[in-house]
Amino acid sequence: MQFSGFGWMGKRLVIALLLGVTLLLNGCQGLLKSQATPVSQLVFVSPSDPATFNAPMNSSAFSVFGFINEGLVTQNGITAELEPALAKSWEMSEDNLEIVFTLREGLRWSDGEPLTADDVVFSYNSIYLNEKIPTGIRDILRVGDGYPSVSKIDDLHVQFTVPQPFAPFLRYAGGISILPKHALEKSVNTTDDKGNLKFLSKWNTNTDPRKVVGAGPYRMVSYIPSQRVIFERNPYYWREDEQGNPQPYIKRIILQIIESDEAQSIAFRSGQLDSLDVTPEAFRLLKREEDRGNYTIYNGGPSLGSRFLGFNLSQAKNAEGEPFVDPIKSRWFNTLEFRQAVAYAVNRERMKNNIYRGLGVIQDSPFNVSSPYYLSPEEGLKTYRYDPEKAKALLQEAGFQYNEEDQLLDGEGNPVEFTLLVKSEEKTRVDAAVQIQSDLRAIGMEANLQVLNFNTVIKKLRQRSWEAYVGGFGGGGVEPHSSFNIWYSGGSLHQFNQGPRSGEPPIQGWEVSDWEKEIDRLFQAGAQELDEERRKEIYGEFQQIVAEQVPFLYLVNALALEAVRDRIDNLKFTALGGAFWNLHELEVEAE
């Protein structure tokens, strides 16, 4: 479970490094298994360290929160239906404007303190809806021009009210992690010497993991940066089976930090990991060893996430009046014909066949093909199939020109050259960036690759100090509004034209285009519309705008391939939930 040409001497060096990783893992596993009492455990892998232990402040796809946190409701990994979690039941009013949740009796936090309605009200009113806390969760809770109100009825009952109908109301009101008032209230009400809430730096990765409090199935025991996070079963977790046995059954989770795909594959093949997201380049080898390695590779179809090429469309300036993007390049990026030309110039069919080994599908829409809201090309979605001549024609129509060396120049004679940012840990993404560089060179553009580790990439995105980016987002599930913080012009993940954020120095001259404003309107309309057919129409219009404006050129959806050890019982793999959506029910023998 993962939380997306050089010579002979270089190859020898890589092999040596990978062998070193394997030996290190063998040593770690030996240490972990040498305990006097055997314990049931699973070993997972992440390509990156967690960025924070503070869930509302997290902006990384790789985190610990799926293990340590819990919401009022949870999603069934087979049906996508909502099921009780911290709340044992809920009741929706006839006008769909009010939900009353009934909490389970006797709930406790991972430190043993009682969990009550006060924690739920605190989580929403003091953190998620607090304007001083720059969390992306606040974006998705927006209802028109307002937000839900949350109030306590008594210790076991909480009332959520919205000012107007909100289609994802139940999923959002229930599915967001509840946070401990007793552990966080002081940090929300006090500031540091710079006037910032202490909550903003609370529970960073320098915090003792044992002091991080949650309501999830596990709690953290230790964290060694660049090596691993260890979790133990939360003794106060609410779940138990029909016989009254505590769940989850598996007592320990180890999350190994292994950056490269190749090193992860070696660790899995040597038996050090219990699951692995299978990359296209590793598929044949892993498939060939499936029986001997006692694992099964599951195929969930096209992954719910996305990979894309995007340009920084921001025309804003920082607090010192310096533009985030070179004004010359900004003019290129903000020219529609430029973005469309790039879309025609990238050979995504070749990318699918060569880089993804045919184990994927070309992506044309922000929505996955399995989404009920997906608008297909057959239904009229605009697409960009490889056509470099059309790309050149579009550029020339927009005032660009070619010199005698077929180098592309803008109308003022500036050569078209920019930096293409990509994270280093995912080989297919780096390979895609290399191909994009080659494809764009064929139409006269020069894209200089900047390959950096994931956390550095995230920092540059947040600082707006980038030009072009080969990026990705995780799957948003079945609710289209879950991507609101990406598409809303003021959203925390609106990377291609990032607006002002709470707690940062002011920016100047931020402009929102008319098509961005129209997307804002459509998302608000879609959230307020309760008729499913009309919602499909609204989100169809949204997909058409994205296809026309190309803020992101979507690339290839890899198949969601996951290799899982056969020793794990009660596995119920699905495309929606993956292999571990029912982690509390899984069983393995103690080691």
Image (tube, helix red, strand yellow):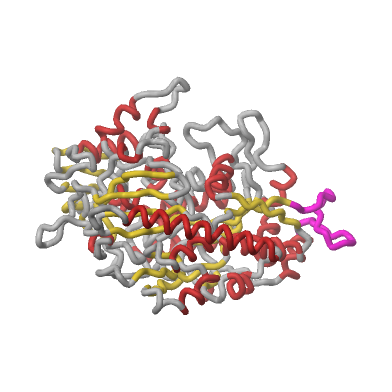
Residue 581 drawn at (x, y percent): 31, 62
Q: Quadrant of residue 463?
A: top right
The residue depicted at 52 percent of the width and 52 percent of the height is: 518
The residue depicted at 61 percent of the width and 29 percent of the height is: 319
Q: Nearer the viewer, residue 260 or 202?
A: 260
Work out whether 84 lies above or below 130.
below
Q: Is residue 93 left or right of residue 532?
A: left
Q: Quadrant of the N terminus?
A: bottom left
In this view, the residue farthest toward the right is 404
Residue 408 drawn at (x, y percent): 80, 58
Work out whether 79 lies above or below 170.
below
Work out whether 168 lies above or below 368.
above
Specify the principal SS of the magenta part. loop
Residue 409: within the magenta?
Answer: yes
Q: Quadrant of the C terminus?
A: bottom left
Q: Which residues are magenta?
A: 398-417
